[in-house]
Image (spheres, helix red, strand yellow):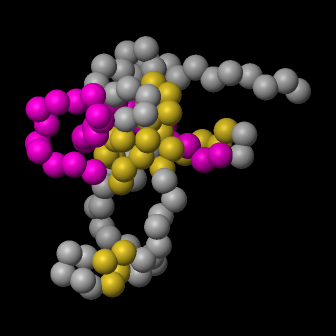
Amino acid sequence: MSKQSITVLADRVLVQVTPAEGERRSRSGILIPATAQVSRRLAWAEAVAIGPHVRAVKVGDKVLFNPEDRFEVEVQGEEFVILRERDIHAVASDRIDGGTGLYL
């Protein structure tokens, strides 16, 4: 079977979530184990493909989304997530000027 290329349609954004880094520390120095579940925590992912009707996201941007509002897909052994553009809460990119003043 030959490899087929994939085209993302409509207002969909294909993202790849970076693997969890395991343990993390709060700003006050409290150690939070990797197994701790934080309710309603948003997640960052990198946009790897976009549909033709996506306006605010470009390939390579970091996007902030709710992990509960997603559809997972496996392509050639790699895990990806498909989101609607309207389900993305924020975009981080070098090309965007005049944001909130916060940096990743």
Q: Is residue 41 left or right of residue 10?
A: left
Q: Position of residue 73 (x, y in %)?
A: 60, 42
Q: Is residue 18 above or below residue 93?
A: below
Q: Position of residue 5 (x, y in %)?
A: 68, 21
Q: Position of residue 37 (x, y in %)?
A: 38, 73
The answer to which quarter of the image holds residue 55 is top left
Q: Is residue 7 left or right of residue 4?
A: left
Direction bottom: furthest residue: 30
Q: Is residue 55 left or right of residue 11?
A: left
The answer to which quarter of the image holds residue 86 is top left
Residue 74 seen in render: yes
Q: Residue at x 29, y 34 (%)?
A: 94
56 in the magenta segment:
no
Image: magenta residue range: 78-104
Direction top: furthest residue: 52
Residue 71 seen in render: no
User: Which of the pair 47/66 is nearer the observer?
Assistant: 47
Q: Is residue 74 left or right of residue 17?
A: right
Q: Is residue 97 above or below residue 73?
A: above
Q: Position of residue 64 (x, y in %)?
A: 31, 46
User: Which of the pair 53/25 is nearer the observer?
Assistant: 25
